[in-house]
Image (cartoon, grey):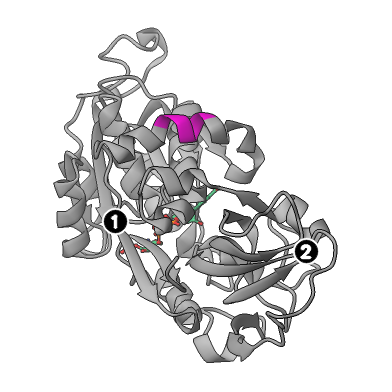
Amino acid sequence: NKQVIFTEIPEGFPEAEKNMAIEESTIDLDAKLGMGEFILKTLEISVDPYMRGRMRDPSIKSYAPAFDLNKPMTGDTMSVVIKSNNPDYKVDDLVYGRTGQGVFAEYVHVSAEYAKNAYVVRNDAKENKLPIRHYVGVLAMPGMTAYYGLNKIGKPKPGETLYVSAASGAVGQLVGQFGKALGLYVVGSAGTDEKVKHIKSIGFDDAFNYKDGNIEENLRKCCPKGIGNAVFRGLVDVSFVTNTNLFILDIYFDGVGGKMLDAVFLVANDFARIISCGMISQYNLAKPEPLYNVINVLTKRICFDGFIIMDHMDYEQTFLDEVTPLLVSGKVTYKEDEVEGIENTPSALIKVLKGENFGKMCIKVADL
Ligand code: NDP
């Protein structure tokens, strides 16, 4: 029974063998279970950028708890119950390990106490015949992040222009597709030409490789000036608006921060909404990069709003009810980068942080 252990707090980019390790656990699959206990066989593990933030000194406070040193790492998982002494988790039930709490091990012995907060039964995953990996991605934390962030924080109106960075990834590819379904003009960026081609193929109106050329110039090329501009569409009071034809974006879904965000401040419309979802370009830097153009938040009356999806779990059922049928009917597609074998979890995390994943990164641990 292999498990993924956090072994050392990294400086800069983590290294697979230095900061994490694959170790055997002593779990006894034949042990008699105490009241409320059960054993899970892990099927799928989700690998996500926020895990880098958990590889820190625990004295530094943040929204997700620091990983414990020399303990198994945790995150989103999908598993099946193989043995149980708990009426709420029966043998063969499919079980979702909630964000940050599903244990990264091939087999997990769960206590009644830990189960209460960490694991939920998801037998709906048996009914609609979607791949198990969807339940740690599009139908889990990343999907909800895209849906909640765009709808609740972006407050999109048909005809507006939406720009999405990290657009081929777990969250971004969905933001763009949801945006198209809402009648927005959608532009994306990604770090390779292959990713750019892909996001155009799933419906983005235009896209660019942000490593190729100047970001601001690329944005001006891709976002047709004025189209979708809130002013021209009469959505805001023109008397307050300045320099309208210089600015081209109404909504920016930011997964990147840094230089990308700084460029968007320059091209955003008056009254634009910037959905601050992630700043992956900063996660491995010892010192954050400076932002030079923040004054535009004031002068353009931009709504610059950060959110953490785990604060909005009351929205989960609405999200699942609305997005599951879109996926089943094929109206929304989802690209995953699935790697086999739990021992590849550390290197998969590093791939995500270095932008080498293409689609939602996940690990297939076992077949159902
Ligand atoms: P992705 O699947 O998009 O993977 C991360 C991608 O980020 C990489 O593939 C890479 O794509 C891009 N990237 C990496 N480094 C840089 C860099 N220096 N500059 C620009 N792009 C970079 O991850 P997710 O979709 O899971 O997450 C996207 C963002 O959303 C992250 O910042 C994450 O922390 C955040 N997030 C926030 C949540 C919340 O609740 N607020 C919830 C979930 C995610 P490329 O080839 O395009 O460079």
Residue for point 35% across, 10% down: 238
In this view of the protein, can residue 248 be seen by the observer?
Answer: no
In this view of the protein, can residue 281 be seen by the observer?
Answer: yes
Q: Which residues are magenta?
A: 318-322
**Location of residue 113 (image quadrant):** bottom right
The overriding secondary structure of the stretch rendered in magenta is: helix
Is residue 358 highlighted in magenta? no
Q: Amino acid at mark 1?
A: Lys
Q: Amino acid at mark 2?
A: Glu
The residue that disc 1 covers is 335
Where residue 24 sits in the image (x, y, percent)?
A: 63, 90
In the image, residue 181 above or below residue 359: above
**Location of residue 127 (image quadrant):** top left
Q: Quadrant of the C terminus?
A: bottom left
The residue that disc 2 covers is 37
Ligand 1: give its quadrant. bottom left
Residue for point 43% across, 75% down: 348
In the image, residue 130 above or below residue 8: above
Residue sitting nearer the eye, 166 or 336: 336
Ligand 1 lies under 8 Å from the Cβ of mark 2: no
Where residue 254 sits in the image (x, y, percent)?
A: 43, 46
Q: CA distance from mark 2 to mark 1?
A: 36 Å
Residue sitting nearer the eye, 180 or 280: 180
In the image, residue 365 above or below residue 280: below
Disc 1 crowd rating (10 Å Cα; few below 14, some 14-19, many 20+) is some
Disc 2 crowd rating (10 Å Cα; few below 14, some 14-19, many 20+) is many
Give SS at disc 2.
Answer: loop
Is residue 321 highlighted in magenta? yes
Residue sitting nearer the eye, 88 or 163: 88
